[in-house]
Amino acid sequence: MSTDRYSIFSVLREALRGHTGWKPAWREPEPKAAYDIVIVGGGGHGLATAHYLAKVHGLTNIAVVEKGWIGGGNVGRNTTIVRSNYLLPGNAPFYEHSMKLWEELEQDLNYNAMVSQRGVVNLFHSDGQRDAYARRGNAMRLHGIDSELLDVPELKRILPMLDYDNARFPVKGALRQKRGGTVRHDAVAWGYARAADGRGVDIIQNCEVTGFRIEAGRVVGLETSRGFIGAKKVGLACAGNSSRVAGMAGLRLPIESHVLQAFVSEGIKPFIDTVCTFGAGHFYISQSDKGGLVFGGDIDGYNSYASRGNLPTIEDVAEGGMALMPAIGRVKLLRHWGGIMDMSMDGSPIIDRTPIEGLYLNAGWCYGGFKATPASGWSFAHLIATDTPHETATAYRLDRFATGRVIDEKGVGAQPNLH
Amino acid sequence: MRIPCPYCGVRGVDEFSYLGDATLVRPDASVPNAEAAFADYVYLRDNPAGRHRELWQHAVGCQSWLVVTRDTRTHAIEQVEAARDIAAARASGAE
């Protein structure tokens, strides 16, 4: 008998019989000739979309096509942080919906995604910044999201290792969201893939979309590296490459692809047990369960599809880290990498229909896509299944740039000289 | 990544600041559909994976604006021209 459901009992049973009963977490089916819905992109968002289409809307004649392998794209290239500390009405309910889905994710998927609500701490350094964070914290509370403003004595209990008297950016306090934290990112991809597959979704890896078949303004299928696949509806969830894929359907998007680098140090003893962001110094950090310091900074700042960045940004991030916590100076860097970001022009995502009937777009996640994974999948599934936007995602329209309804959460988009 | 500035020679990328796609042309504000044309101009991008002509300024050097032709998949730089030369050619109708 094989082991379908993961539990303490299945682990014990398999331990007693030499782990011979585990099955692959998902099938590797050949693509069928046609599906009701095809999701392009087997990252976190695409797999979550397939999962919620199957679970919430009862639709199972679905394929997820992925040009590489599951977990090989941006879902495995981020710094695993989840939070919902947003200011604007168009964003806060969406990201809080995501936060609530994270909190029940492991039970929903029957998969250990190592959801760790260790808190997210945003530092401030001046009276003006304190006021801005107090405003943000109050806006969060009005949306029912937890937030607290910490003064220096409170902060020193959580983060004793900071350089509080830094000459340029003395630490004056922080805004904290205790329910924020980290989630093991590739387990999210695997968990969603396994759950979607369990409900009958075909996950087709090594299947690159090479074109769309569009008849009378309506999408009827996809040309792929594994042949033509018919589809009544197609959802694009291929952030990083959204412009390229949408370009095959003749669409031009308000997006530039940029490279964002991230870093992991060698494993060290427990050092920092929360997520800490130092926005003024372009640096944020947390510590993985293996002990590595996981940190990053800003995008490199030029169009790139190279999945790797350049040395000046590495130096900039390292300088930010040294300014904030000089204690990490002797820690060796273990590895670093780059991911390709869909930088939308206002810094906010797009979940919307397109001018082509049956073609839906999920794009423009900038460097904030990971935390949005569950709500993005939920909202995109809702849009595809019902043809109406989910109530938490009505602001993420494709036409908001032309109509002036941009969502300037940070006041910056792709324009690198504004970062 | 290093950029060969036509005036200063090969310099590190950290001396330069980036503005983006150099092929965009500001629309004529007097045409009837100028609003839509400006929305496209301000927000929409080709965003190619491959050859990309883009504006850089040698901000910490000679401050010249440059048009760099670069491959966005490899960061290899094919050509660097002075933006003023291209603007002059465009104004005279050569491009």
Image (tube, rainbow, N blue to C red):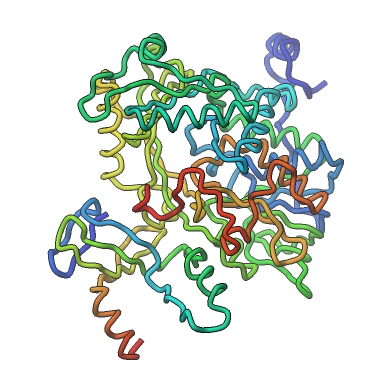
Residue A252 lies in what quarter of the image? bottom right
Residue at 60% over, 26% down: A141
Asked whether, in this view, residue A149 is left or right of residue A416, the answer is right
Residue at 71% over, 54% down: A235
Q: Nearer the viewer, residue A3 or A396?
A: A396
Task: Determine the residue located farthest toward the bottom in the rendered image.
Answer: B93
Where residue A367 appears, as percent x and y from the top left, is 49, 43
Residue A246 lies in what quarter of the image? bottom right
Task: Determine the residue located farthest toward the left in the rendered image.
Answer: B8
Asked whether, in this view, residue B31 is left or right of residue A417, the answer is right
Q: Is residue B85 above or below residue B63?
A: below
Q: Is residue B61 above or below residue A106?
A: below
Q: From where the camera sits, is residue A359 visible? A: yes
Task: Determine the residue located farthest toward the right in the rendered image.
Answer: A58
Q: Nearer the viewer, residue A225 or A267?
A: A267
Residue at 53% over, 25% down: A182
Q: Is residue A114 above or below residue A409?
A: above
Q: Nearer the viewer, residue A1 or A249?
A: A249
Where residue A255 appears, as percent x and y from the top left, is 51, 58
Asked whether, in this view, residue A175 is left or right of residue A236, the answer is left
Where residue A143 appears, as percent x and y from the top left, is 64, 30
Residue A142 lies in what quarter of the image? top right
Asked whether, in this view, residue A377 is left or right of residue B47, the answer is right
The quadrant in which the N terminus of chain A is found is: top right
Q: From where the camera sits, is residue A28 visible? A: no
* Number of marks in picture: 0
Where residue A196 appears, as percent x and y from the top left, is 76, 37
